[in-house]
């Protein structure tokens, strides 16, 4: 697995000596007949981390989660919880709890009984202790008054909180969440994100969070892994992964991105039309490697407007479409060599906005761009 | 393979057998529907029996037809298992022969049937199908002749030939039982079924097929309804049904004993080999063969009574001269003389031959 | 609205199945036809109920109305043959229903919850069991019992009834299970319930209405079966067999009484169960939606 | 990965594999076994018995007498072929009738009544099932009897001739079959119709289809699977059914079902009966298979 | 209806004389028993306009659309399609076509037959003409090769295009779309928006578009109406409605928004803590009226950074949370008087981003704020 470590340069590997990783996947794979859902995956979560698995539909996120939870057996590889090999253990013998995408609340039990279910099964506590634990966890998710309600009598957001409480009440070492917000609508979702983050900070247990919504992942995670057809494309803190993606897929999946082919002559990197461009520091460019610039890093202004610093890269272009989004405007620009570029500008004065057809100047700071080696492309 | 019936019989010492048996106060009686007295659902004869002997009778009218009923109990009998019945009532015919030949029946202990010896009519003693009444005693006797609707048919009906009269086309009824149909065919040709040969059967079948175009249907026990409501004008018929019909207001239906003669049949009580209450069964047989009980049953059933002395009882006590004086219920000698028995089938192959000849007449 | 399902999901967002007032004109042909047919189907039922109260002189049903009476109900058990037959039918129906549910439910679970070699074979077997013509099933069973020289009777009836009831139970319960989705069982085992506890605490409680329904269906199928039973009954007489036999010479009124009683009881049970289901319906709806 | 975690022995993957994969078989075992022992094997033994020869006296022994299938239908003195065709004819007519009657009913419940009325109406359709099959059939015989109230009324009103009767005619048998199996047709069609998204019909209307066209081009094609399921249930049930034929029919309406019953239960011709029922099974199987091909219905199992 | 016109100042009412409006709703209402789905609605769409109905779930959008399409009958009011009263006409007699939320493609017909359905029903064209028309419309939506596919064999996005082609092929006067993107995922959605806009420009027919996604509405519409529990809250071009919302509901529904209570003394408007604030021009302020500022209009910087112009409003505050969203960062700030404010900053250099707890300076240009009269609140 050494190769992967170099590639991902994860910061978690070092300190095993101290305390064992909360979760460790060691070359775990899962095949369903022909389809390879997960392909020799390596993961390592230090205790207390909020870690997200991010990826398009069908990339193997759920399967990975299910293997950690014990709902699927890996076809190969080992799963460690807390340094212990649990690969073969059934779910009910693992110190892990899950918040299911559809919550999977027991419709025949009321909220209280749902939350108490796990404690009852373990039977380590007497009735009062159970009552207290359940009460305080309902408190925690802000559903103090709802004990007697049935799952059918509460809203999606509330159901989601119940599912959370039902998992947390067992004080698991690790909490698994499979697109817990999938069923919620945009507004509730936003507040739940904040809520969830708060709770994680309070209880301080490890969260393994599955989602295909990159903004959600970036907003909440300490680290995230971008998965693609069963294997891990990139892993690291959100800022790193967003600003310096390791692969083209990551770059594009985490939000739209301009990717420009580079040619090198005379040690200078040039764009398609030959314009010389400054590179980000430390990026050694080869012909065929690609320069990436996020649309929000492209400053767009009327020709001659003095945007950016002295050592910024500059291009002339024309606006092809300007899409008004309220808070911001999205521009589609055509570069001199005809390629389409996307730019993104926060809206301030309405009259400052460019219209389709306007000529314009594009500016970006080399430090805001990144390089992709062609092999990763 | 599926076990057959032949060779399943075993030798029994009936004295020892009866010595071992004793009364248990229960009797499972399998009979035909509407074949015992019913007054608003009460059956006087059985109630009297229970009062007299303390034997509780479990009377079940489960027998629709001889063959199907025999088919249902045959497997048990072959396997020497209890059929659940202590008395079954079966018409003389192949099934009965079969049961006797294969030792499926208990030999009756006539020392316990004094009433039979005393009261039974000569016509039911020592029948050709069960010499000496070793295994059976008659429950009812009946005649199969011709009935016609005198409202519609003004000329007198005298012969089976009349069943061939084109004027009656589409209004002639026949029985669906191939024994009855076949016998009718032979009588029409002046053949005595009891002594008939397969060659005769073929001729009869030809006659019947000739007659077929006139026939409106080959009916089971429902034939009488078709007579009553005038769908059929002339039909093969059982004496008792016609009598009941007359009694219930269809006076215009007339029963005829054709000049070629009529068929006589006997429904017999018998005890299956593994029956669990044979003594109780015997007690009933004996009880039934008293004028009083026979009369009570007869006054409702109206077939032919096996106990001649019942006539007075019906007349005097039950005050029912119509039944008492009916030649169909208490027939005079010469009626018997004009009655013929069915052909006897020695073994299945013969019976099968009969079926193959006559089933095509009926099944269509 | 931001789940990443690629396929359109027709059942989302309230789509009115019927138009509320203001309506467009419609000629009421359909309702008339519907109620006409229903009316016709009611005729024999009505006749049965009415004539069970007819004061018939003989113990055969007759057309002429001789006045209202409860006599036949009061003397319901008068015909020992009929009563026995009815009791036998009840026993067989109850036993076969219970046994079919008990052994059919696990089969349904394995079919609904697992992918395994031979699954489709089992499925087709269940399907065939429902689809096969009863006359063939009856005949085949009889040939079987004959060839193993097993005398027909109560036992054989029971065996065969269980055999065809299993299929009905499996179909009903399987539908129920797949409606439930396996997530709940996953959740239970995630909450430290071993498979057995998970079944007892989660699956079973949610399955109860389904089991009741399956049981009732099985019971009905068994108590009403004539064709198959007629082959394997031997000398044993069940209610339908008795009725069939009696039909040839005219039914005793008590048959109609029993029929009426079955009718009333069955109807009430069905209605009650319907209401029960309605109560469970919402809960099922929730679990189903959340899976969509 | 500390030495400790590495050193810890891992439980045998094989044992888990077995324990997990044996579960479905254990669950399926009782009922599956039951079905094999008392459904599949009998079906086979039915075939076997048909290949036996003998008679109830001598018993029957297996002689692989395939020729029976020829003998039954070619030059047999009892024309079983007629009975078979008659059964198919009656069954077919009944099936068509149930479609013609059942479809509008299902449509009415599915589309024209408020949701809360649907299950009550369905219950009405099912109501006759709460009366014993034999009783309700015989009640028809009772009502339609030649001297029964219904026909008498007609005769007195001189609507029909005095000779007119219903019982004993093929019409009576087909009618009985239709009546008894109507619900088997209504239910699956109703289910299929329920599955149709009403917006689908609105879309058709939006695309200039008037009500007739909406029905012909949308509803009918989309309810095909329901009709198929119905046909499956009704045809199978009616073709072999002996009860309607014998209670409502007469001598001219003798069908294969009765033939099988009589061969078994009256004449004890076990081999003949078994052969007939095997033939019936095969014929029905082929019929429905070809229909499935034509109707292009996917996975028949789903229909049940 | 006069009142509404004053309130919305729609620009379409005047020119009835010229050419009739493509759609006109005249005091249309729809009741379902108790619930009032639509409440005397007035609408007027000039031909060729792309008009959006925007509003929360259950506000009556679909019902309105269904009444235009003829699937519902209004309880009151009149529906005109280019000048003609069609209130009572059944759908198949209206020159209008609909793209349904769930597409409602006919599962038993292949793509070609689906698209041809309308033409065949009308039967005005012979087979070839039909074929040609269908082909060219599949072309138009970029599904040339898909004629033979079944609806089950195509992706959601493609199904969506088929539904569109099926409607457009009939050259209707008006096209109705009910959340046509509802079922699509974010990415496909984006591209479909552009597609749809392009197509509308090409065919140039009137679009009535229903959605509850404000950015979608703003990105595509010429004008939009914000609906709320059956009536119209605000109507106009996106920029106007976003930057100068007529009501509080509109302001909040179109995107998050800081709303500050104002008090007036000495003719000067002051915030809760008494800071004097400059008003947008022409806004006459009364006590109790509310000042609205969109988060992206709030510039946030470290204390002392010289942001904004000379006449900008300035406030001191501290960052409570900073949520990283990749392209931008969302700040929650606490104002001196304790109220929470939202701000939104495009991400440029990672190190320029503020962290939770940092003190900061908030700046906004008075012209970027708007006033709500208390009665509208
Ligand atoms: N039980 C199963 N049987 C067969 N294939 C499966 C099964 N479960 C998952 N797969 C396949 O494995 C792959 C990964 O599935 P998985 O559910 O992990 O993806 P995912 O990332 O969770 O997608 P989504 O975001 O839609 O939930 C998919 O191609 C899926 O089809
Ligand atoms: N057929 C109906 N019967 C009863 N109430 C209805 C019906 N159709 C709609 N309603 C009610 O009318 C109101 C408006 O419904 P409508 O579908 O127009 O809202 P919407 O804006 O389309 O919501 P969404 O965005 O969820 O589609 C809702 O309260 C809904 O419950
Ligand atoms: Mg998933
Ligand atoms: Mg809607």
Image (cartoon, coloured by chain):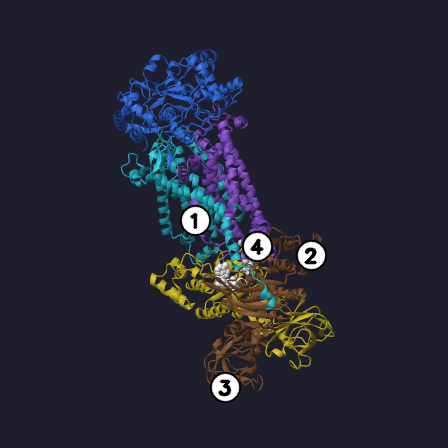
Chain colours: A brown, B blue, C purple, D cyan, E yellow
- Tell me, yes or no, whether the two marked residues, 3 and 1, touch with CB atoms within 8 Å: no
SS at mark 1 in the image: helix
The Cα atoms of the two marked residues, 4 and 3, are separated by 60 Å
The Cα atoms of the two marked residues, 2 and 1, are separated by 50 Å
Quadrant location of residue A95?
A: bottom right
- The subunit letter for the residue under badge 1 reads C
- Tell me, yes or no, whether the two marked residues, 4 and 3, touch with CB atoms within 8 Å: no
Give the residue pinned by disc 3: A276
Callout count? 4
The Cα atoms of the two marked residues, 2 and 4, are separated by 23 Å
Q: Position of residue A256 (x, y in %)?
A: 52, 73
- Answer yes or no: is residue E237 visible: no
Q: Position of residue E250 (x, y in %)?
A: 60, 66
- Answer yes or no: is residue B8 visible: yes
Quadrant location of residue E35?
A: bottom right
Q: Is residue A356 above or below residue D282?
A: below
The Cα atoms of the two marked residues, 3 and 1, are separated by 71 Å
Q: Is residue D67 found left or right of A296 in the rendered image?
A: left
């Amino acid at each position: 697995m050494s190769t992967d470590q170099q590639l991902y340069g994860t910061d978690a590997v070092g300190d095993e000596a101290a305390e064992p990783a909360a979760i460790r996947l060691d070359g775990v794979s899962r095949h369903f007949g022909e389809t390879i859902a997960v392909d020799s995956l390596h993961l390592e979560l230090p205790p207390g981390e909020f870690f997200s698995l991010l990826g398009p539909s069908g990339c193997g996120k759920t399967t990975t989660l299910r293997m950690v939870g014990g709902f699927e057996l890996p076809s190969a590889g080992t799963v460690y919880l807390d340094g212990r090999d649990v690969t073969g253990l059934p779910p009910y013998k693992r110190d892990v709890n899950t918040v299911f995408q559809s919550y999977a609340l027991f419709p025949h039990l009321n909220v209280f009984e749902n939350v108490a279910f796990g404690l009852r099964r373990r039977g380590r506590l007497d009735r009062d202790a159970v009552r207290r634990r359940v009460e305080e966890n309902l408190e925690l998710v802000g559903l103090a008054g709802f004990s007697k309600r049935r799952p059918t009598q509460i809203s999606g957001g509330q159901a989601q909180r119940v599912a959370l409480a039902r998992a947390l009440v067992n004080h698991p070492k690790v909490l698994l969440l499979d697109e817990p917000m999938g069923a919620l609508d945009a507004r509730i979702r936003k507040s739940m994100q904040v809520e969830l983050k708060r709770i994680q900070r309070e209880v301080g247990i490890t969260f393994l969070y599955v989602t295909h919504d990159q903004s959600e992942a970036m907003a909440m995670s300490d680290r995230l892994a971008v998965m693609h057809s069963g294997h891990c494309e990139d892993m690291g803190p959100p800022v790193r992964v967003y600003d310096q993606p390791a692969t083209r897929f990551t770059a594009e999946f985490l939000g739209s991105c301009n990717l420009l082919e580079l040619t090198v002559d005379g040690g200078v990197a040039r764009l398609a039309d030959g314009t010389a461009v400054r590179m980000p520091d430390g990026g050694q460019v080869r012909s065929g490697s690609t320069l990436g610039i996020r649309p929000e890093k492209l400053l767009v202004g009327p020709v001659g407007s003095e945007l950016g610093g002295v050592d910024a890269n500059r291009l002339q272009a024309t606006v092809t479409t300007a899409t008004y989004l309220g808070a911001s405007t999205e521009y589609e620009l055509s570069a001199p060599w005809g390629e389409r570029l996307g730019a993104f500008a926060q809206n301030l004065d309405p009259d400052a906005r460019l219209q389709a057809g306007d000529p314009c100047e594009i500016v970006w700071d080399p430090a805001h761009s990144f390089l992709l080696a062609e092999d990763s492309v | 393979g599926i076990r057959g019936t032949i060779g399943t019989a075993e030798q029994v010492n009936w004295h020892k057998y009866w010595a071992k048996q004793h009364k248990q106060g229960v009797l499972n009686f399998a009979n035909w529907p509407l074949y015992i007295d019913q007054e608003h659902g009460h059956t006087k004869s059985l109630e009297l029996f229970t009062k007299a002997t303390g034997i509780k009778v479990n009377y079940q009218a489960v027998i629709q037809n001889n063959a199907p009923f025999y088919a249902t109990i045959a497997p048990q009998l072959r396997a020497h298992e209890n059929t659940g019945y202590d008395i079954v009532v079966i018409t003389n015919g192949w099934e009965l022969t079969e049961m006797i030949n294969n030792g499926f029946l208990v030999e009756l202990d006539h020392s316990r049937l004094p009433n039979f010896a005393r009261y039974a009519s000569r016509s039911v003693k020592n029948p050709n199908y069960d010499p000496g009444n070793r295994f059976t005693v008659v429950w009812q006797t009946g005649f199969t002749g011709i009935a016609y609707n005198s409202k519609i048919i003004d000329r007198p009906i005298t012969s089976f030939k009349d069943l061939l009269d084109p004027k009656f086309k589409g209004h002639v009824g026949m029985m669906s039982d191939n024994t009855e149909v076949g016998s009718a065919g032979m009588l029409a040709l002046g053949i005595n079924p009891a002594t008939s040969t397969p060659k005769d059967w073929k001729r009869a079948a030809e006659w019947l097929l000739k007659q077929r175009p006139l026939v409106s249907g080959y009916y089971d026990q429902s034939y009488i309804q078709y007579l009553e409501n005038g769908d059929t004008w002339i039909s093969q018929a059982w004496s008792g049904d016609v009598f009941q019909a007359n009694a219930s207001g269809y006076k215009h239906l007339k029963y005829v004993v054709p000049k070629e003669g009529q068929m006589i049949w006997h429904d017999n009580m018998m005890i299956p080999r593994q029956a669990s209450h044979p003594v109780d069964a015997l007690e009933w047989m004996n009880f039934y063969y008293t004028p009083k009980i026979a009369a009570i049953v007869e006054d409702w059933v109206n077939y032919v009574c096996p106990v001649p002395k019942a006539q007075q009882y019906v007349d005097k006590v039950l005050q029912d001269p119509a039944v008492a004086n009916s030649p169909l219920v208490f027939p005079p000698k010469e009626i018997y003389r004009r009655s013929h028995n069915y052909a006897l089938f020695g073994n299945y192959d013969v019976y099968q031959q009969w079926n193959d000849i006559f089933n095509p007449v009926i099944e269509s | 609205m931001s789940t990443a399902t690629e396929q359109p999901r027709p059942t989302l967002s309230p789509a009115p199945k019927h138009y509320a007032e203001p309506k467009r004109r419609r000629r009421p042909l359909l309702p008339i036809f519907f109620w006409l047919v229903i009316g016709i189907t009611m005729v024999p039922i009505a006749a049965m109920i009415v004539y069970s109260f007819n004061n018939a002189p003989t113990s055969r049903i007759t057309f002429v109305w001789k006045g209202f009476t409860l006599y036949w109900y009061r003397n319901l058990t008068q015909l020992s043959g009929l009563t026995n037959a009815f009791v036998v039918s009840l026993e067989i129906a109850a036993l076969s229903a219970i046994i079919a549910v008990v052994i059919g439910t696990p089969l349904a679970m394995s079919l609904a919850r697992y992918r395994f070699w031979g699954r489709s074979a089992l499925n087709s077997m269940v399907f065939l069991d429902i689809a096969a013509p009863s006359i063939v099933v009856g005949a085949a069973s009889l040939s079987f019992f004959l060839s193993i020289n097993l005398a027909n009777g109560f036992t054989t009836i029971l065996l065969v009834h269980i055999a065809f009831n299993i299929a009905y139970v499996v179909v009903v319960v399987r539908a129920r299970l797949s409606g439930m989705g396996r997530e709940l069982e996953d959740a239970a085992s995630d909450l430290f319930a071993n498979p057995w506890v998970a079944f007892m605490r989660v699956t079973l409680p949610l399955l109860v209405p389904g089991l009741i329904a399956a049981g009732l269906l099985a019971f009905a199928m068994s108590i009403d079966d004539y064709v198959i039973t007629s082959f394997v009954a031997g000398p044993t007489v069940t209610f339908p067999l008795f009725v069939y036999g009696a039909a040839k010479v005219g039914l005793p009124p008590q048959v109609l009484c029993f029929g009426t009683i079955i009718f009333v009881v069955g109807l009430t049970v069905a209605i009650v169960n319907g209401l029960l289901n309605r109560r469970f319906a919402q809960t099922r709806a929730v679990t189903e939606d959340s899976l969509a | 990965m500390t030495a400790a975690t590495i050193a810890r022995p891992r439980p045998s993957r094989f044992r888990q594999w077995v324990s997990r994969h044996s579960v479905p078989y254990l669950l399926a075992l009782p009922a599956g076994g039951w079905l094999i022992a008392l459904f599949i094997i009998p079906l086979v033994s039915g075939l076997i018995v048909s290949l036996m020869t003998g008679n109830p006296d001598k018993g029957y022994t297996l002689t692989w007498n395939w020729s029976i299938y020829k003998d039954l239908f070619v030059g047999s003195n009892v024309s079983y072929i007629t009975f078979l065709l008659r059964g198919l004819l009656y069954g077919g007519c009944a099936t068509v009738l149930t479609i013609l009657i059942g479809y509008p009913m299902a449509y009415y419940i599915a589309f024209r009544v408020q949701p809360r009325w649907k299950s009550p109406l369905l219950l009405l359709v099912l109501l006759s099932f709460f009366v014993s099959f034999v009783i309700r059939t015989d009640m028809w015989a009772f009502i339609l009897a030649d001297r029964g109230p219904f026909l008498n009324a007609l005769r007195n009103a001189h609507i029909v001739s005095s000779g007119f009767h219903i019982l004993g005619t093929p019409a009576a048998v087909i009618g009985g079959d239709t009546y008894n199996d109507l619900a088997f047709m209504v239910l699956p069609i109703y289910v299929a119709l329920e599955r149709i998204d009403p917006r689908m019909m609105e879309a058709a209307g939006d695309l200039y289809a008037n009500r007739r066209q909406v029905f012909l081009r949308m509803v009918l094609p989309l309810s095909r699977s329901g009709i198929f399921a119905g046909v499956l249930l009704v045809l199978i049930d009616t073709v072999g059914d002996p009860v309607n034929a014998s209670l409502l029919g007469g001598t001219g309406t003798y069908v294969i079902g009765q033939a099988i019953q009589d061969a078994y239960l009256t004449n004890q011709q076990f081999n003949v009966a078994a052969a007939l029922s095997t033939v019936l099974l095969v014929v029905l199987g082929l019929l429905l298979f070809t229909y499935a091909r034509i109707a292009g219905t996917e996975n028949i199992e789903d229909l049940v």
